[in-house]
Image (cartoon, grey):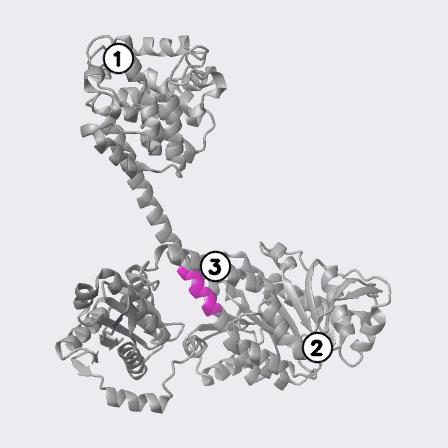
Amino acid sequence: MQFYNLNFSVTNLTRVDAMSTIPTSSSAEMIGGSSGYDAAVSAIQSTALRPQFNPFAYHRPADEQVKHAMIMIVDDEETVTLAVRKFLSEVGFCNFVIVNDASQAIKQIQQNNPDLVLLDIRMQVNGLEILRTMRQHESMHRIPVITLTGDTDSETRIQALSYGADDFLTKPVNISELVARVRNTLSGKIYRDQLAKYSSDLEDDVLRDPLTQVANRRAFEYEINRRMIEWTRQRTPLSLLFLDVDFFKSVNDKYGHQAGDHVLRAIAKDIERSLRAMDLVTRYGGEEFAIILPGCNSVEARLAAERIRKRIEESATEVENNIIRVTVSLGLATATDRDTVESFVSRTDKALYDAKQHGRNRCHFHDGHKCHVATSNRISAMDQGLGGAPTSASESLSRSTTFAKILVIDDEPSTVMMVRKLLNQAAYVRVQTLTEPVKALETIKSDPPDLVLCDIHMPVVTGLDILAGVRDDIETKHIPIVFLTSATEAEVKNKCLNLGATDFLSKPVNATELIARVRNTLLAKAHLDHLASQSNQLEREVRLRTAELYASRRDAIQCLARAAENRDDQTGQHVFRVGRYASIIAAELGYSEERALWMEHAAQLHDVGKIGISDSILRKPGILTQEEFAIMKTHCVIGRKIIRNEAEFNLGGSRNHGNTGSKLFDECNSPIMRMAALVAETHHEKWDGTGYPNGLAGEKIPIEGRITAVADVFDAVSSKRHYKDAVPLEECFAIIRLGSGKHFDPKVVEAFFNCQQDITQVYLLHNNNAH
């Protein structure tokens, strides 16, 4: 065996680069424990074991990320940590940090930020204390932890789960189960991390107020509707605060709007500092804020309101050597049985108005009938009695999960009755039982629960059948399933875990362990459900905003194109037809649907440079002189400059508005506008090099220019203008064919004729000469 010690000044941190493999004997299937440890010691110097199972047989999208996740193994027995690392390496895991000095565990976790910690409980430094410390620190409290212990009593396992362990393994550790649990835990973390990042990105894009960096009114409307639905279904307490800055106009008038913005930002921060992480602070409009307080009854909400009021009253904002102090008025309401979203918001608003009418710098409460003063003395007394600190997010979530829907499936009526009784005693009020496994999938799909507790061994339909059916349905695949089983076979457990089982509970069920596992599982699901719901809503909002932005850009492009063309073709149909013809040709040439649409919009701007051409030339009824034609040809370069907003472009005199207007379309970072600039400059270039303005030839002409050239000439000859009559349709097609290889790219002409029927249909529908 060969390995290298990385020298750290304060810790014994070992990285294994090479080691012998593990034997296939039964003892080598276990690591740790009284007899398993000796087996591990001898196994490290023995022959190879290739695992008898494939833990990745059931493919999941996150498997590649799982294999590269950082796993930290904390155990003061170096031989055990090396053996665990070796087995995980055998099946594809490749990123490890090994810590044998437990006193340095917290420091190493903070430095390395692992994706998973495998933590031994029985060390010189108690592993449970390490776990407790992790769960109390913001930087570490979301890192998954699987505890390892040689204790067989349930009290130790329950204690680990209560401290926040995600899972545990009993020494001697079964390797197959270790791999499966590590994979499941990492898969869950990766999914949560992706959802959290996606939600954060979307939230910044759609639901954040740019000035104060709190949520905006759109976020408020979404969240208050969602919370009221929860209130109707679960009756968890819900309170709402409206806050308005007193005499804010005087701040703007005296110090200026920039100072007012500083004050609003400071108020937003003060509000956030006064509340829990789960409360939603939104800028409702102007100097008014709305705050949603889930899980807060009227007493707790009054405490929160008074904390906010006092903090803002005692704060000061310094702007350009001016010290600005403000006060706020607050209105408060708590949801009642009679409330709708509208009535709930209306009552809160009335309470705010009442506070402002009665002297400001106070909070008034609407009880459903009338408003009351939430007096400072009374609030202060309650604040002292309740400790004055906001409850944690986890405590509030814990309260809300008692309303989760739990389905217990077991063919033994005595078991389901006992489990239901234990859950009811722990305040879980929505427990459904099922003793006919054949109806399980139908029940789950028709009314999806938040958690399934299911026996494995049942007649006709087994727990594995139910698990497979749930995971195969997109609507139910994320429902957690905890198995109740008296089976101890590792093979059965491994199969369940690889199929997606969430956890196990041994029969006979221990009441304390049951409640701890149900609570932890429901908390994890509640968090995932919230992130998924928020992500879906935000994604819809992004799509809506994207569509609105695209429509606005399309309208702006068409407006500019018509403005240019109106001086030459008052019908405005020329730019539309050229765009449609260009899009049809582009699609025939293999453009994607999106890129063909870009082509349509870009081609509509082909003659935008005519804005810079004098009316005496543009509207001249006869043939242009050489000098006039030379000026006319400059519209290609002018068009490019307008679209790109090049500084040297200036129409001069009364036409300066053209250059100014073009700044509105400074979209050169947009693929459509980059394409439009190419079209404007090159649509008069010819395949044989005799075109203008640059005399480009062949494929040196951008394809966008070659496509638009065909579309533009076809529409020009088929349309009537003030200086010419329209050419019959058959002759128009003949002109295009004759120009192939001279004026036009032969491939573009071929594509044009391949879609002749579509071209003709556009001509007949949108050309006045065809009627």
- The residue nearer to you, when weighing 411 against 129, is 129
User: What residue is at 35 percent from the left and 30 percent from the top?
Assistant: 602
User: What residue is at 64 percent from the left and 63 percent from the top?
Assistant: 70
Crowd band around label 2 with a 10 angstrom C-alpha radius: few (<14), some (14–19), many (20+): some
Q: CA distance from mark 2 to mark 3?
A: 34 Å
Disc number at residue 628?
1
**Residue 442: % across, % down:** 48, 62
Disc number at residue 101?
2
**Residue 303: % across, % down:** 31, 83
The magenta span reads: 525-534
Per the image, label 3 sits on a secondary structure element best described as helix
Q: CA distance from mark 1 to mark 2?
A: 88 Å
Q: Are marks 1 and 2 in contact (CB under 8 Å)?
A: no
Crowd band around label 3 with a 10 angstrom C-alpha radius: few (<14), some (14–19), many (20+): few
Image side of residue 457 versus residue 725, left or right: right
Name the residue carrying label 3. Answer: 197
Q: Which amino acid, by three-letter code, is at mark 3? A: Lys
Marks 1, 3: nearer the viewer: 1
